[in-house]
Image (cartoon, rainbow, N blue to C red):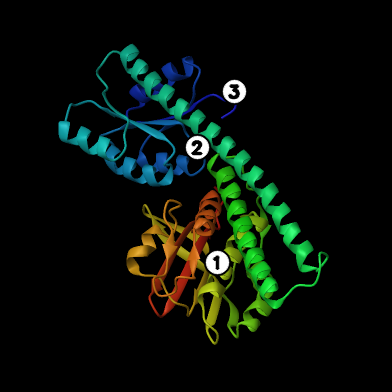
Amino acid sequence: MTKDQKPRLLVVDDEDDFRTLIADALEAEGYAVTQARDGEEAVHLTRQFSFDLALLDIRMPKMNGIEVLEILRKEAPTTDYIMLTGSQEIHIAVEAIKLGAKEFLSKVQPLEELLNRVRNVLRSHLAEVKIKELQSAFTSKLLYNLLTPLRTIKSSVEFIEQESMGKLTDQQRSILASIDSAICTMDAILNDMIDLSMFESGRVEIEKFPTNLDEVVPIICSRYHLQADSKKITLTVDVTGNIPTVEVDPAKIEQVIGNLIDNALKYTAGGGLIRVNVSAKTLSEEGDQREYIAVSIADTGVGIPAEMIPLLFDKNQIFIDGKLPERKTTGLGLLLCRSIVEAHNGKIFVESEVGKGSKFIFLVPTFSI
């Protein structure tokens, strides 16, 4: 949030008079306020806009405040939530706090007192946002500073490999090759960390253009045929049905596909198979039918233990295959994939079985959000 931006608040209540009263009072405080008459409208709005704070009424038709909170915590995890109620039901208050609500306030208290509680929550929220921005800026600067000496080392290794300082023995070449490989791995990790840091700080802009994924995906995959052939892996691409044009950032989507194919090649043995598929998919969400384009990358590789699957998109975890200790990844690439897909309001998930392979699927909506 820049200095000129107003904090954005969402007020959700089916009582028109109370909702308007609260919204007007908050606008008078200098906040940008959006109103929603029920939970479904609130969910729809959070898919279009980001909010610093949402005030949710407990008792509403269709979906009550607790149900709305559960959905919004997944849809908008960076938003803080205050629950409003006309009654004092302790068990509901406890449930709301467990789900992540910051406050549970009575609608019958004086307006000024209610506004003061809102100010306190918002002040805390904005302070946390500022701290995260400072942490992200520091992290990005640190990572960039690490890249410079790393690339200097790489240039020095390449200089020695050219035998500019004298003839090399086979053993020396082998050692230099290992060093070069380690440098390339570190370089890739640092770049992934920089990209992630920028996503988490909100400094990455998604530039969407009308894109035909049924044309783009095969072109991206064609760049990996030589690498697949060198490992005697068969790489196929299929397009199922009519694929509508979607609004995406082509470069970012290419980054996701490339990352997933790289992983598939890494964990698939010679003679294996990698299948890439593009298809249209319809999902039922909150009673609505939503259209997506699904891109899947399936391999016949080592597979992933069931207990490790929930950790794959967690940057605080490291996945190590016990049987193949040399196969090690920080998982940052997958976390970056998730960040890119979610920035497109999409979804990403994995299906896998040890010894039979893995299938990563990501969805991007055909509808504009």
Residue corresponding to mark 1: 260
**Kind of element beneath mark 1:** helix
Residue corresponding to mark 3: 3
Which amino acid does the dot numbered 3 rest on? Lys
Q: Residue at x 66, y 58 (%)?
A: 250
- Which residue occupies the extreme right position in the image? 164
Please tell me how many numbered marks the rendered image carries: 3
- Report whether 195 appears left or right of 321: right
Which amino acid does the dot numbered 2 rest on? Ser
Mark 3 closeness class: few <14, some 14–19, many ≥20 residues within 10 Å: few
- Report whether 92 appears left or right of 320: left
The answer for how far apart the CA atoms under marks 1 and 2 are is 29 Å
Q: Position of residue 160 (x, y in %)?
A: 77, 64
Locate residue 36: give its quadrant: top left
Which amino acid does the dot numbered 1 rest on? Leu
Residue corresponding to mark 2: 50
